[in-house]
Image: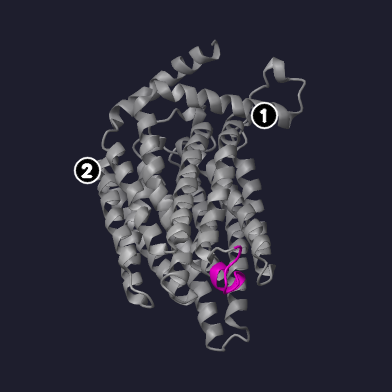
Amino acid sequence: MRENPDYPKNDPRTIFGWAMYDWANSAYITIFGAVLAAFFTGTIVPDEGFAGQSGETLWAFVVSIGSLILFLAMPMLGAVADYAAAKKRLLRNFAVIGAATTLVIPFVPDGAVVLFLVVVLISQIGFVAANVFYDGFLPMITTDDTIDKVSSKGFAYGYIGGGLYLAIGIALIALSDAGSTGMDVTTAQRVAIGGAGLWWIGFSILSLRRLPEEGDPRPLPENLSNYPKWSAYARIGFGEAWKTTKLLRSFPALLLFVAAYFLYNNGINTVIAVSGAYAEDTLELAVQEIAITFLIVQFVAFGGALVFGWLSGRIGTKPAIVVSLIIWIGATIGGYLLPVGEATPLYGLGVVIGLVLGGSQALSRSLYGSMIPEENSAEFFGFFTVFSKASAVLGTFAFALVSSITGSGRSAILFIIVFFILGLLLLLRVNVDTGRASREDWATIGAGSQSD
């Protein structure tokens, strides 16, 4: 990809704008885990459950369904973004979809389980789809020696922005519980959820103003020139995604890392997605206590992302991820052992999770980004997000299935340890130097594939 002279690599203004999108959308993801999941299980779902299932099981199932939809759509969207030079436009469009539907969530009435899950599903699709195009900017605006630091900076901004909004939401809920706002706790929760959409779209405007434009799109191939643009790009997108899938066989180190990430990210995504519902339904904790735990995670994760960014500079990116996964295994066991009705142990576990959450995610993204060809960054990050979201399909579905069969969220949370262990074993076999060197072969191998 030709560098845009108006937005040179490692430009502080551009990097700040990029990181601010993480600040913007993290209000949604913190509210999603800390308030929305517990609000669903405690307010929207009737006390007797719905369709014979508990609230936490239903929540895990809907997260799994959303991830499956994204699993099917993301490769096409990533490839289209590269081909149409549309990362920025698609980032904006999906951010608007996600934020707008977040504003609708508070108006869904109690007991409307299906409607609530549908609206949440659309907001989740907007959130994740926008992140494909956001991640695709990372190789455009950095170099190999800065990509880890910038990736960690993005996560750090996200943890601070999301944590700050969550603190506002907690304060609103706590003051309402004390009778100081003129609204009841349920109404305060609804306001906090809707406010996340306003925060998301408001700060996205600042971010988008500083992100680079990509120039002109590539001309359509002659055999597709008579198709409507959306149809032509869809065909190109699926074709490029399939080509990328086949070509990955020529990049064994990258393919092995994707497989490892797919497995251990099952654990990470599932913990993030179901912890709020697990704490409300199984541990019988109040929404305020769950929200405080997420707040602890957010602010510890800010330091954790920076610490693991520093650690990667000392011992290497891959060894730093290995350290984080070992800690994740211990944290999962700790989640299984948490007592009912006691918030303090959950707060302590939040500190541990916060420490490794930023490091494992930021370094995984930057390690992958350092092994892919820059000129196809959105396509490859689309592929990466497929496996990221596919891991949520398997992880949350496994949680829902084990919880449904055993009737216990504890058994389900303990089962997640399997994904961390298998992912760690595969990661240990990844040769990072070979993966990074193989980027130089992409143009040759990719060009050869065009003539197949």
| Left or right: 25 in relation to 110 | left
* Residue occupying image coordinates x 54% and y 65%: 55
* Residue behind mark 2: 315
Q: Secondary structure at mark 1?
A: helix
Residue 429: where, in percent of width, then height?
27, 33
| Left or right: 108 in relation to 154 | right
Q: Quadrant of residue 348?
A: bottom left
Residue farthest along the left direction in this orientation = 315
> Looking at the rendered structure, which numbered label has been put on residue 292?
none
Q: Secondary structure at mark 2?
A: helix
Asked whether 387 falls inside the magenta stretch, the response is: no
* Residue occupying image coordinates x 47% and y 39%: 387
205 or 127, which is in the foreground? 127
* Residue occupying image coordinates x 54% and y 78%: 172
Q: How many marks?
A: 2
Circles 1 and 2 in contact, beta carbons < 8 Å = no
Q: Name the image quarter holding the C terminus.
A: top right
Q: CA distance from mark 1 to mark 2?
A: 43 Å
Residue 415: where, in percent of width, then height?
36, 54
Q: Amino acid at mark 1?
A: Tyr
Q: How is the image coloured?
A: one colour
Q: Quadrant of residue 367?
A: top left
Residue 7: where, in percent of width, then height?
52, 38
Q: Which residues are magenta?
A: 40-51
| Left or right: 436 in relation to 242 | left
Mark earlier in primary sequence (1, 2): 1
Q: Amino acid at mark 2?
A: Ile
379 or 52, which is in the foreground? 52
* Residue behind mark 1: 233
